[in-house]
Amino acid sequence: MSPGGVPRLARPSGTVRACVLLTLLAVSGAAILDLVRQQTGTPGFFVGLGLALLPVPALLAAFRWLGRAVPGPLRQLMFCFGWGACAAALIAILANSFATEWIAAATADPSDADQLGSVAIAPVVEESAKAAALLLVFVFRGRHFTGPADGFVVAGFTATGFAFTENILYLGNAFGEDLQNGTGLLDSMTAATFFVRIMLSPFAHPLFTVFTGLGFGAAVLAGRRATRVGLPLLGLLLAMGTHALWNSSSELGEYGFYAVYGGVMVPVFATLLWSAVRMQRRRLRTVGNELAVYAAVGWLDPAEVPALASLPARATARALARRAGGRPAGRAVADYTAAAAALALLRHRARRGGAAREPDFGSRERELLLRMWGLRATAGPALARAAVLEELFTPPPHTDPRPADPLPEAAGLPLGSPLPVPVPRRTPPRRSGPWTAATPSGPPSSRPCALRGGGADR
């Protein structure tokens, strides 16, 4: 009860929210599949379903690969895919149909209504419906939305789901038309639709929505409130604009489609792909720089840091662990890697934004460190061995089992930026310093420790 005596409703738990969202997706999925089947007919529905499914695994794997530097939860990404395929597609088909019918009734010209709906209505409705998934992740799973790279991946999964359902509709309708006309395979509308939508432009919807994802990702790093609101809106406007341009390409003359495809879509796609690769490399450098602090104070072995900042070394470590301990060991290395990468980005954001931007930094940092500590017995040796095999780390000839006390200047933090840093418990201290008493069993403790220096990736 609140201080004023008015009962205060408890905030729904994460389980309740998950059940509500899953129910919403299930209901909208059943509804959209029934609507599509009614429009395409049962034979057309199954043909469209089989053909539309072909590019999905490759697209999802590509976006997952682009986000592997700091992998997000797979359940979250599959929710985004389900939202795009079910909820966003249902909103789009209902809103587009209503708007087209309203315009046709107002203008008494169905052809103009279809054209106006395709260019002016569909981009706004569809991109807004897809953006809703990004907004949900941004608001309720903010700890997993750490920058533009996460926005890129989340947007890609959402748009791939939407394109999947839309392709079922287009391919199913084309197949139904071919059945009525008795058209041969090579001259069929089904073959032409498959070539354009599946072979030539499977990346179209992901390309549009990625702009919205980049806007949300940039908002995470923005300082002012107005900027955090404006950047997602700007990204959404860019998504709508490119979507409208793509839909209008067939109205720009005989070669309009090819001009838009070759002059706009392909260069924009190549630019975004190049940007995604650069963001991945920048994140890996950040992981290496930030985790060096934790290695210096005993949470990680020094050999683990270069392995955690290298995608080939991570893969080698997983393979080594699976060879020694089976799938559970490989899964432990993957979980350890994900927690370490999330920890590095958490510290990076806290250094840049301060306590106001990361008010729960201490509790979140300790949560990730303890999760890593529980997996370290399996993951640590595999990562250290992978660093040696990948020639990222050369072990010293005489290794002292006791880590040396780190110098503040080597921690990689900007001047005057004290943050809570874990300090190990070990016996005996090699020289006087800010170390706590010895506890040989159990993880290192945590307490504030002001570290200074330079060299962190900004």
Image (cartoon, grey):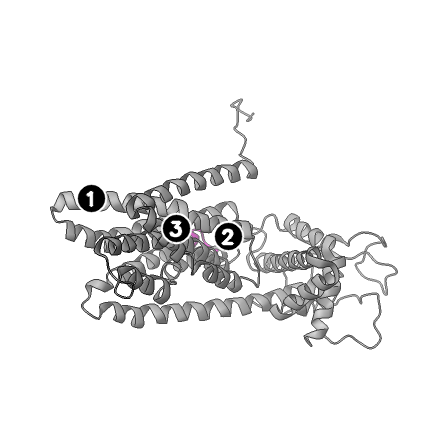
Identify which residue is drawn at 69% across, 77% down: 391
In reply to whether residue 447 is colored magenta, the answer given is: no
Mark 2 crowdedness (10 Å alpha carbons): few <14, some 14-19, many ≥20: many
| Residue 254 pos. (x, y %) | 19, 69
- Residue labelled with disc 2: 77
Residue 368: image location, x then y, percent: 66, 52
Q: Earlier in the sequence, mark 2 or mark 1?
A: 2
Task: Classify residue 13 by image quadrant.
Answer: top right
Residue at mark 3:
130
What residue is at 72 percent from the left and 74 percent from the top? 388
Q: Where are the magenta residues, as a range? A: 223-230
Crowding near pointer 1: few (<14 within 10 Å), some, many (20+)?
some
Q: Main secondary structure of the magenta part?
A: helix
Q: Is 294 or 191 nearer to us in this picture?
A: 191
Amino acid residing under circle 3: Lys
- Residue 311 in sight here: yes
Which image quadrant: the N terminus? top right
Q: Which residue is mark 1?
A: 101
Q: Is residue 83 left or right of residue 375?
A: left
Q: Specify the amino acid type for callout 1.
A: Glu
Three-letter residue code for mark 2: Leu
Secondary-structure class at tag 2: helix
